[in-house]
Amino acid sequence: MINTNTFTKISSIVILFICTLSSCKNNTTLQQDSDLGSENPDARTVVDAHSFSNPSDIAIDHMHLDLSVDFAKKVLSGSVRLDLNRKTKAEVLHLDSRQLNIEKILLDDGSEAKYLLSEDVEYFGQDLAINLKKKTKSITIFYKTSPNAEALQWLKPEQTAGGKHPYLFSQSQAILARTWIPCQDSPGVKFTYSATIKTDSNLIALMSAENGREKTEDGVYHFKMNQPVSSYLLALTVGDLQYQSLGRNCGVYAEPNMVEKCAWEFSDMQSMIDSAEALYGKYVWEQYDVVVLPPSFPFGGMENPRLTFATPTIIAGDRSLVALIAHELAHSWSGNLVTNETWNDFWLNEGFTVYFEQRIMEKVFGKAYEEMETKLGMGGLKETIERLTNENKVEDTHLYLELTGRNPDDGLTDIAYEKGRFFLQTIEYAVGRDKFDIFLKKYFEENAFKPMNTARFEAYLDEHLLKGDSSLYAKIQPKAWIYGPGLPDNAPNPQSEELDKVEVEAVRYMNGDKATRLKTKNWTTHHWLYFLRGLRHKMDINQIAELDNAYDLSNSGNNEILCDWFQHCIDVDYQPAYPSMERFLTSVGRRKFLSPLYKELVKTEEGKAWAKRVYEIAKPGYHSVSSNSIEAILGIKS
């Protein structure tokens, strides 16, 4: 990983020093080109340790993509035009590029630019250094993606719900945008964009931009995004999709045989938008749509502006998992509007979003629902803190992370999400909800379309809310939350009357009462998850079998419940559940579900052998984000 980028002039040769891993042990040097321009090293300011780019000198203002989709070759090919903001006299533009075949680069005067690609650095790819002229205001890069581009998943027809047409989707977060577009792949760099995408006329192309709702006759689609976004929010999907409106400014895209089911599941979406606007101000992105992707999508959701990508695993048939939609909607303010400047500041995106999500859910579904989710969230956070502590990763339990020299994907844990949320909840309790809401609304308005880092947030919090009040500081303990390990001693202690009832039933069962006598009527997903998590490592194989016989948990239609249930089954080697677990692992690509199951399986030699066999079957249906994680768990070298 990149620690620092130093550019210097040595005999008119641009040399890129990339300090990676511990103590800057690895240096990568650009190939020599005596005609490539040089720049003043003092003009460069390192902002993002995970990017080669130099936006403090030259920043992308606007991007225009012109790409063709080739399902047979699994490549995108065409060009990207970058309109530039020349901030200094620097004459070399640095972009992030990974697995890209750069064919040529033209300057806006029609001449061909000289450029250099550094040696490849693991996870980061190559620095693409482009020589500009003094009056250059835009460049056009002609390129092709690799069939193995990690951001892109190409699915065969049989891997889709319809089974007739291929499918493509992207996943750019955290630093995978560079695998399908040469860009300044840093969350602190924002730009507008437009695009022309050419594909099969049987399919529709959608992007994180203004979208059409019908297929075109020629398979050509035009897009524009007039609000500035970060590279990790660039998104493309192409497939056989239909649209159904769900309200004034929202709707859902899905494969034709799923669209009605998805529309029913997301019927509260307009209420969520209205509730969010009532809390923290106008939804500025105009339209909010969701596209339900095939099962291989590695995350629950991705908050691409105007077009959230969502996993089909939330289609539970009872609307019990739609908090994910509230979460991705909340990102329209926290993340998409006010964005973490670097991946060390990731909690500023996710902590705010989980807090906002819970406020939306409380407003739409009531206090009891919110209390259950909050109590479950604290339980998951404590488990994460315990795991990271046991793995000697205590520093990863801080909100502000030190990810220099590491894959930013390492920061995608419950710490950013749940510890961040409970920190904000602590502030709310200290100052009062009304006052905190006024603060947050002003925070989103004043920092709209800007990056935010942890230090600036601390200053903003002090200036606009705490105002130097030492008693409030002592009550909230901001430093302990942001820079300290685990949970501070003032952490909230969530309560839920609904989950208290579940605890009574769990005690009854552990004291010998029959599974069929448990009072489970009207239990939601949250009730079952609390029940199962509370009994983890406490039940023997006979109790597992009894529960399965009573409630058929091995064949639940709810993926959240299945994930927790299968962990119990692995604990006691409950073999009757293994056929169902194999179907689950080979049909679901969401990393949240896959990782804990594979981690449990590898604890025994028999389990590891079984997991490796299943993985070989499942691998073609996993996105690289998931397969990379699973191969690390299984000890498989790619």
Image (cartoon, grey):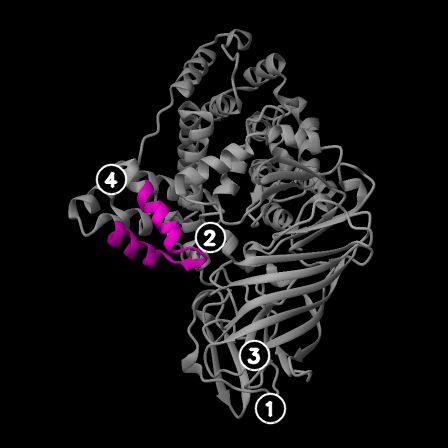
The reply to whether callout 1 and callout 3 are in contact (CB within 8 Å) is no
Q: Which mark identifies residue 29?
A: 3
Q: CA distance from mark 1 to mark 4?
A: 61 Å
The 10 Å Cα crowd at callout 3, few under 14, some 14 to 19, many 20 or more, is some
Q: Is residue 31 above or below residue 542?
A: below
Mark linked to residue 34: 1
First in sequence: mark 1 vs mark 2: 1
Mark 1 or 3 closer to N-term? 3
Label 2 is placed on what type of residue?
Answer: Leu
Q: Which of labels 4 and 3 is toward the front?
A: 4
Front-lying residue, 365 or 103:
365
Lower position in the chain sequence, tag 4 or tag 2: 2
Badge 2: residue crowd in 10 Å (few <14, some 14–19, many ≥20): many
Determine which residue is flagged by label 2: 337
Mark 2 against mark 3, which lies toward the viewer?
Answer: 2
Magenta extent: 437-464
Q: Amino acid at mark 3?
A: Thr
Q: What is the distance, in whole Å, between disc 4 and disc 3 at their CAs?
A: 53 Å
- Foreground pick, 113 / 250: 250
Instruction: Look at mark 4 in the image and give the residue it sits on.
Output: 431
Please say whether residue 210 is visible from this viewpoint: yes
Q: Does residue 546 belong to the magenta stretch?
A: no
Residue 571 versus residue 629 in the image, above or below: above
Residue 104, placed above or below residue 186:
below
In x, y percent, where is residue 202?
A: 82, 47
Where's residue 327, x and y in %?
50, 40
Q: Of tags 1 and 2, which is closer to the observer?
A: 2
Tell me where residue 564 appears, x and y as whole percent: 55, 29
Q: Bin the neighbour count of mark 1 within 10 Å (Cα to Cα): few under 14, some 14-19, many 20 and up.
A: few
